[in-house]
Amino acid sequence: MRILLIRPKPDRETIGLQHLMICEPLDLEYLGSVALDMGHTPILVDMILEGRGLGYFLRKHSPRIVAVTGYITHVHIVKSYCRIAKQILPDCVTMVGGVHAEVIPEDFRDARVDVIVRDCALETFRHVIRAVDGGRSSERVPGVWCPDEKAGSSAYKPPPEDLLPARQLTAHYRNRYYYLFHRPCALLKTAFGCPHTCSFCYCRAITRGTYIERSLEGVMTELASIAEDDVYIVDDNFLVSRKRVQAFCEQLAKHGIRKKYLVYGRADFIAAHPDVIETFAGVGLRAVIVGLESCKQDELDAYGKRSTVQDNEEAVRVLARYGVDCYATIMIPATWTNRDFRELGCWLRRLDLAYINLQPLTPLPGTGVCEATDAMLIPRDDYAKWDLAHVVVKLEHISVARFYMNILWLYYRVLLRPSQTRKHLARYGYWQNVRMSVAVMRISLQYIRKAVCAMWRRQ
Ligand code: SF4
């Protein structure tokens, strides 16, 4: 049985991080592995990279199952793919999964969507394949969402230890997967969830607040099978415990694995464990994505971050000391004034950060941040704009146009400094920098367009 696994292309409205990164669809590669294990034929189509429309792949492969994954921003696109699949192949079974389907499955309700996976994705996928192959209905198989049932009712289950993602399914795309200057770049997952409890965090909603680690032996086996030199470890938080990170570094040395790593980590861990960062940098750590979130203590407290502004500042210093890039993310609440933006700019320049990601604080469904409906600027079903870049909540002090222009101005003020440009050129060369400049221009144009539209609507 042929099974088409589809990664959707973002909507034109979505402000595009895809200009700065396109990562391998690890979740679909895991599904592909399950299908192969059962003796079926998975075909993985990455619509971000494909020039041809979905119809071409449906006609070419005539799959029995069409499975699509996506985030909240993809809801309309995922449904439209299922509609196209049903038009071209009326007998196929359409299946929707991914992090948003697991948290808010009802958003994918549509006459053309046969199966919505609400939890235990891999096991559920196995059950659905069995049902379809046996000519049975897949409606009531465990893990499939029924309208009369609550989402996320059972405990989170990670992939089995011995199941590795079927990376061969993306062999023809692999040299086009990248993250900023990490090119080509593979993805690896070594743990699921996070033991911390930040109120805005979506990751915790997906794993129902649990944190589960894979065995490091299994991780090493997988790492050794990855061809790319750059590996983006997509654990929600890789820097959880000194013991595990040190053991990871020892295992790398023991297995003779030499790669470059990009991980997520908390500022308080980095600030408190400079020796661990030094050791990790010695075996390949190149960059850490750190949720600094704010330069104000009251905001960190309100987010339940349980770290301090001093931790943030110390973390940036520790990473710089060991030659590790800090990719800092900052959240901007709806209460901010122009002055807050100016203060943040001074703080970021003082820390000499070269990479920042500024995100309007977004009350993603399923997290601890909620807003009353009348406080929303963008309705929940305008999914493509829930991209952590659009302003979705009504602002208290400044216009939306001004907010977007402040963000853009801050990016340029922090990133476009001669010292940073020299550093990037020395480290990554001319062409990587040209490529990155084009990406930044494209995102800037999106922001300018948003600001002009907001002005036009007098928002
Ligand atoms: S530390 Fe990071 S991953 Fe963990 S709960 Fe906070 S934001 Fe989420």
Image (spheres, rainbow, N blue to C red):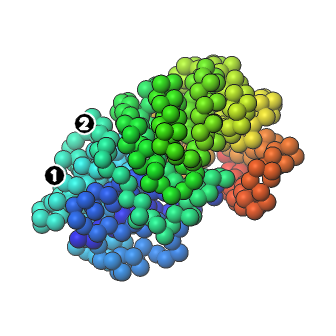
Would residue 397 be visible to someone looking at this image? no
At 60% across and 31% down in the image, what residue appears?
Answer: 279
Which of the 4 image quarters holds residue 295?
top right
Residue at label 1? 140
x and y, in percent, of residue 203 in the image: 44, 37
Q: Amino acid at mark 2?
A: Ser
Name which of mark 1 and mark 2 comes first in the sequence.
1
Residue sitting at 16 percent across and 51 percent down?
140
On-image quarter of the C terminus: top right
Q: Residue 301 sits in which quadrant?
A: top right
Image coords of residue 373 (percent x, y): 47, 37
Q: Secondary structure at mark 1?
A: loop
Q: Quadrant of residue 322?
A: top right
SS of the residue under disc 2? loop
Query: In the depicted view, which residue is nearer to us: 156 or 115?
Result: 156
At 31% from the left and 43% from the top, the residue drawn is: 161
Give the residue furthest to the right.
418
* Disc 1/disc 2 C-alpha distance (Å): 15 Å
* Residue that badge 2 annotates: 154
Residue at the spot 56% in from the left edge and 64% down from the top edge: 175
Q: Amino acid at mark 1?
A: Arg
Circle 2 residues within 10 Å: few <14, some 14–19, many ≥20: few
